[in-house]
Amino acid sequence: MKNHEVRVYPSKEHLPKEEQLAWKMAAMATDPVDLDADVVDMIINRIIDNASVAIASVNRRPVASARSQALCHPRSGGANVFGMPIDQTFSPEWAAWANGTAVRELDFHDTFLAADYSHPADNIPAILAVAQTKGKSGADLLKGIATGYEIQVNLVKGICLHEHKKDHIAHLGISVAGGIGTLLGLDTETVFQSMQQALHVTFSTRQSRKGEISSWKAYAPAFAGKMGIEAVDRCMRGEGAPSPIYEGEDSVIAYMLGGKNARYTVPLPEKGESKRAIMDTYTKEHSAEYQSQALIDLAIDMRKKVKDFEEIESIVIHTSHHTHYVIGTGAQDPQKMDPNASRETLDHSIMYIFAVALQDGEWHHVKSYAPERAKRADTVRLWHKISTVEDKEWTARYHDKDPKKKAFGARIEIKMKNGETIVDEKAMANANPLGARPFARPQYIKKFETLTEGLISPAESKRFLDLVQNLPKLGAQDLLGLSVQVDQVEVIQKTRDTKGIF
């Protein structure tokens, strides 16, 4: 890996395109390296993971709305939409929109946290939709996805968006464009222009994940994927983009991020070096914000030590700066303590999540967020006794560059009314690669089978799992099977309607 320093250049100080970050990423995207076997294996795992959570959310309102928009754009030789019959295809940007929303809705797929945070599997719906539409092979798809992960993960390592209240999809549109460039075998110039265009149109504020969190939290990554597809399409037709997109005097760093004096360092593979960033990422065992994964596991463990929840006087979660200020009481969001809050808000409230996991000894992607569960009087009482504080040691571990030391956990202090204090801590979620029960292929398959049970037939489950595990050998026609058809329940919004403009 090579570190690249990025800064603002005044217009009078010419920066050759070959020295611009977007060009360096485009050159990496067009470097024809083979994939390592463990990377191929992990990409297959993440495609299974995406399908799991997408089908589990198939009849949730945001997903149904996104699907209804996609159904207004049928296209012969296009891409599949999760839940719909495999023989129905749609324009790739709209299939990516519907599928990206379905994947993101439950906050239940993979994650990468460093200087910023991300869900790198958000790359997959858009890259897959283009692969299906353009008749690419399974091997082509694997390389495109590997590039998408490589770009997004390394941007997350080097450039913090959250510090400047920008949404993390700003690292996604550009990674989708780069991944599609690899998939289609485009030249470096076209990929360079595509990536710059995609970045330019996908910067937005963090309000989508702050305060009263709405369904846009699920739509935002799908929007970035859709914009990435459209940017590549325009640039394949010869169009260009604002440039230099990062380093320009009036561009991203200067006015969206740290300003004219800011310096960022972004690592990228050198020419000929394998793309392995996906191996730094991790999926979720529980449907909630990633920083809550270890805390859910810890709550389940600590439950055995608490005999009477009503005898708890207070619970203090000592954790990282990020956890405290994003999903903890440091955010100062009253909605995070509100029993009437949306599901999207509750999954960004570690106080709510810890209270329910402690009481129930489990976490469920539907039952744990049900309105009646959130409004239960004893839960509200416990929930409102929980607070978070930043612990500098946990903040340091959150940002540690050594993956064996990096952690997203906390120390919990439960103070009982009788003066007893129960203390425990956990650094890694059980499902993390360094956790107690790391996820591997059997766990991904189990997650798929659990989340799709009652929604798809055993035959459809077997068909999809057999196909995706043979991904390196799949031809163009086979890729149209990398969707999942819901055939055991009624799918809402499965036909075109006239509710909107389209």
Image (tube, grey):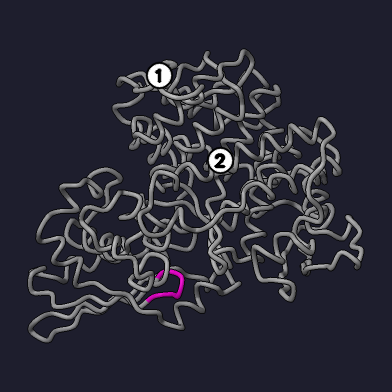
The residue indicated by pointer 1 is 494
Whether the magenta-drawn stretch holds residue 320 is answered as yes
SS at circle 1: loop
Is residue 87 inside the magenta stretch? no
Residue at x 90%, y 68% (from the top left corner): 13
x 34%, y 37%: residue: 451
User: Where residue 495 sits in the image (x, y, percent)?
Assistant: 42, 15
Instruction: Please tell me whether the stretch drawn in magenta is mainly helix, strand or loop.
Output: helix
Measuring from the top left, give residue 328's x and y in whole percent: 35, 69
Q: What stretch is highlighted in magenta?
A: 319-323
Residue marked by disc 2: 223
Q: How far apart are marks 1 and 2 (CA)?
A: 21 Å
Q: Residue 98, how many percent across, how many down?
A: 49, 31
Closer to the camera in the image, 417 or 21? 21
**465 or 74: which is nearer to us?**
74
Residue 350 is marked as none
Q: The residue under label 1 is which amino acid type?
A: Lys
Question: Circles 1 and 2: CB distance less than 8 Å?
Answer: no
Neighbor class of circle 2 (other Cα within 10 Å; few <14, some 14-19, many 20+) is many
Q: In this view, does 304 lie to the left or right of 246?
A: left
SS for dot 2:
helix
Residue 375 falls left or right of residue 225: left
- Callout 2, which amino acid? Phe
Question: Which of the image's four quarters has the N terminus?
Answer: bottom right
Instruction: Tell whether 140 sits left or right of 372.
Output: right
Q: Is residue 180 left or right of residue 214?
A: right
Is 287 rendered above or below residue 190? below
Identified at 41% across, 63% down, the residue is: 291
For residue 4, what is the image quadrant? bottom right
From this view, report whether residue 422 is shown above or below residue 361: below
